[in-house]
Amino acid sequence: MNNGKPLLFELGTEELPPKTLVKLSQALLEGIKQGLRAAELDFTGAKAYATPRRLAVLIENLALAQPDKCVEKRGPALAAAFASDGTPSKAALGFAASCHTTIDQLERLTTDKGEWLSYTQVCQGQSTEQLIPDIIRQSIAHLPIAKRMRWGNFTTEFVRPVHWAVLLWGDQLIETEILGLHTGNITRGHRFHAPNPLVIQHPEQYERILYEQGKVIADIEHRKTLIKEAALHAATAVQGIAHIDDDLLEEIAALNEWPVPITGHFDERFLALPAEVLITTMQTNQKYFPVKQSNGHLLAYFITFSNIASKRPESIQHGNERVVTPRLADAEFFWNQDRKKTLASRFEQLQQVVFQEKLGTLAEKSQRVATIAVWLAERVHGNAEYAKQAALLAKTDLMTEMVGEFGNLQGLMGRYYALLEGQPADVAQALEEQYFPKQSGSPTAASVTGQVLAIAEKMDTLVGIFSAGLIPTGDKDPYALRRAALGCLRTLIENQLVVNLVDLIQITLAQFSHPFDVAATELGVTEFMFERLKSYCLEQGYSPDEIDAVMTVHPPEPLDFMQRLQAVKVFRQLPEAASLAAANKRIRNILKKSDTPPALTISGLQEPQEQQLLVAAHAAALTIQPLLAQRDYQATLTQLAGLRDAIDAFFDHVMVLTEDLDLRASRLALVEFLSAQFLTCADISKLQS
């Protein structure tokens, strides 16, 4: 692009919420880019900047103006535009006036529907300078801000008070008003290191001036890289490895404009606590990176970051050490207090905690889950007693002091306390794994008891909430039922658990005693689960027609569904696949036209092609029986693919819907028998060529 100029927009604010800084920054960037595209203003690149006190966007090589457009206006039909003597009609004169021209300047447009008067007008594009202010204002207005605030005497609203706004296009200042402020070319550096105003003469100077004169690293990705490298380096000084959580890394980068690492130490007695407790305390409460040994065990050190290059960093270190010590002491107190009571003794407390108004307490939920878990364990050859025990203990750690303080440790602390009490290892592990998978792509439960408990717990929630009439709509899913459904399906499929989903839904429904429409709930949950299964299959790379081919035969077991789906995917690669899919489509269409159920009789078939197909189909049916018993759908479809030549010959030489009704019945019975063999796996007529 020629003649373009860079554009810089910066909004200076009070400290922005660190957990939403990146989201706001990217939303502002995308909003401005969309606005430029909508206005047909070309640019070659765009970059976002974000620090605790600013959001900024740099647009590279932004066009000077919109392109000119040729707009063709159509007027009256030629027959209505002139009288017989050639005099222009009122319609023609009015059209010319509306185009600000004369009759002789109008053109004639010929189409297949006739001739018309027309006028082509060149509309000059607006300048970028005129368009930019509104594009920016619209982008700010649509930022994903949950709660906006006002400040001072301003009527404008934003996530935090704003103090300055920069809007430069090349070396030209675009003067306008943004959130009640007049734009300029004055920015601010670090609050303490460079409090004086900084002048930006050109957008391309922005990042360098902030760094060199303002002690601000404007690029958050650059800050993240520097923070990570500094943390790793600092940890090596104490013979450790920094434990870097990606979310915390982003949050620390959002808290600091000039990050400086500080290494702190805490009393080694706290290492007797579970590592997850220490990590949670340091990461969640203090925003520290824990330090580990090479074997994964924690060291009594942490890495924090200061937003200032202090002349006395030891003071910052000691201050952080003084702050973290009581936090760790609290965790130690919770740990000691919690171990004075068994998990089982806390079950009574669950009767005081309501899970959902119509569904009762957590104690009642636990009892329902126990019944479902036992039913599941019996079907997957698990330990039913362990499943029941784990289900009854599953929510008891919610009543502990530790989980009361650190909610994200639920399940995990249940495992620790159960092991200390001498509970079976499988039961203890299941208490943690009941919440698996915790997020998209994370592992499912590893132990059979954990898998059973995870499924039972999620199904109770899913079916229960549906029975209470709180079905997810649109993007509203307050009980995370989509995640629960997907978690159940993944646990069943990825751990090769043979469970009938319809039976599982029915046994879960049977646990609820409040008034509700059982049939409607069963249908709703079933459809919901299979929709999630379809989404899961799409994410795994299967095509919609492959999924439809399996969905049509309604396999009730998710694992069986996936085995069929894999077989269909392999089948469609065979050279016979396209021909057989077309033949099955033809068979389905023929059978739709038949109202009477046919009876298959060998004596009724006359042509050699149909007799040969019958023999081949019977032979294939016998061959695939043991394969189906082993659920070897891939081998089954491969065997059926061998029928292609016989099927092609049949349709080339035989008319199924003949006038002879007895013969028609026999032929219909043959094609239905043939169709039934394929439907033992999937409806391959759904496959698109």
Image (cartoon, grey):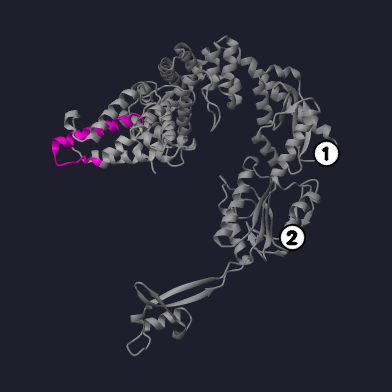
Q: Give the quarter of the figure containing the C terminus.
A: top left
Residue 531 drawn above or below residue 445: below
Task: Tell us which disc is closer to us: 1 or 2.
Answer: 2
Closest to the observer, 437 or 623: 623
Magenta-tinted stretch: 653-681
- Give percent across and percent down for residue 66: 58, 66
Q: Give the quarter of the figure containing the N terminus.
A: bottom right
Q: Residues within 10 Å of mark 2 (few under 14, many from 20)?
A: some
- Give percent across and percent down for residue 154: 62, 55
- The number of discs equals 2
| Residue 183 occupies quadrant | bottom right
Is residue 679 a member of the stretch shown in magenta? yes
Residue 622 drawn above or below residue 286: above
Query: Which amino acid lies under the numbered mark 1 shown in the image of this protein?
Result: Ser
Q: Is residue 177 visible?
A: yes
Q: Which residue matches tag 1?
A: 310
**For the residue labelled by badge 2, is the local secondary structure a helix, a strand or a loop?**
loop
Q: Is residue 532 visible?
A: no
| Residue 654 occupies quadrant | top left
**For the residue labelled by badge 1, is the local secondary structure a helix, a strand or a loop?**
loop
Closest to the observer, 142 or 244: 244
First in sequence: mark 1 vs mark 2 = 2
- Give me the C-alpha separation between circle 1 and circle 2: 32 Å
Residue that appears at 74% across and 60% down: 202
- SS majority, magenta: helix
Residue that appears at 49% across and 18% down: 448
Q: Which residue matches tag 2?
A: 202
